[in-house]
Image (cartoon, helix red, strand yellow):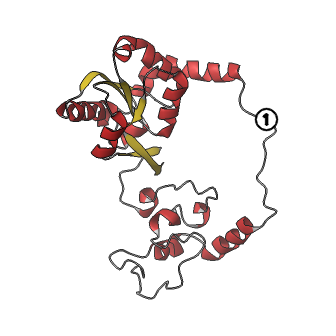
Amino acid sequence: MNRSAWKCAEELDYMLGDARVVSIFSCGICANLSDTGGLRGARFLAETLETGGREVAVARSVTACCCEEIMRQALRINAGAIHGSDALVLISCAAGVKSAFLCEPGIPIVPAVDSVGSVPVSRREDAVARSLCTNCGHCVIAFTGGICPLSECPSRRKYEPCSRYGERGDLCAVDVARQCIWKEIEGRGDLEALMELGCLHENASFRRLVSSGSMPSPRMLRSVSGWIVARAGWFARLVPFVN
């Protein structure tokens, strides 16, 4: 899932500017599972904005903000409130914000959260679940036991530990208040294969595979999005425990 975290109050206030009346759409899937979205997130943000002197015309949990058809449906259902609002506030990852822009609601779109990387849906405190995807363009987690070294290593080392690796035993040589993530990676992954992968990525002749097809046809996209919309209620029931 795409994990999201709340923006600071000052940034949100800056983006809203002179908007006095706002509408809120909150994603019911990824943001919901990040403890920012869903009905709970919509209510929290509505109370926060109202305390700050703004009026909330509507605060809705949308099944999946990233789907353009679902976003269009939400805008259509809440057209009255949207028409009377100065801004549409999205509690969603960047995909949901882009979906809203594609739908052109006619008012400014303001994201209330930041996308902070992909994580598994897990409640375990584990290095694999904790490490966030940094969208670096060359994923290496196949050789690190599922841990993103860029997000967990203070030195932002990707293909091998820093030169001070092991200097303080299991503690990080840069930040002694934490465990060295490379010790964890060494136990889970394959450091030798990881360094060889780094050499492959540095190769100037590196070329990505190109699939024979291109983007799905508009007809196929409409078919898939229609299937999702038809089962919106079923999707909503997948994550009721965090609302």
Q: Residue at x 42, y 82 (%)?
A: 173
Q: Residue at x 78, y 50 (%)?
A: 209
| 230 vs 168, nearest the viewer | 168
17 to 119, vertically: above or below: above
Disc 1 residue type (three-letter)? Gly
Residue hosting label 1: 213
Whether residue 84 sits left or right of residue 106 in the image: it is left
| 108 vs 241, nearest the viewer | 108
89 to 146, vertically: above or below: above
Label 1 crowd (10 A; few <14 / some 14-19 / many >=20): few
Where on the picture, by quarter, is residue 243?
top left
224 to 172, vertically: above or below: above
Where on the picture, by quarter, is residue 207?
bottom right
Counting from the top left corner in percent of width and height, residue 237 is at 38, 27
Whether residue 13 sits left or right of residue 230 in the image: it is left
Q: Residue furthest bottom?
A: 167
Residue 108 visible in image: yes
Q: Residue furthest front?
A: 18
Residue 231 visible in image: no
Counting from the top left corner in percent of width and height, residue 5 is at 37, 47
Counting from the top left corner in percent of width and height, residue 29 is at 42, 35
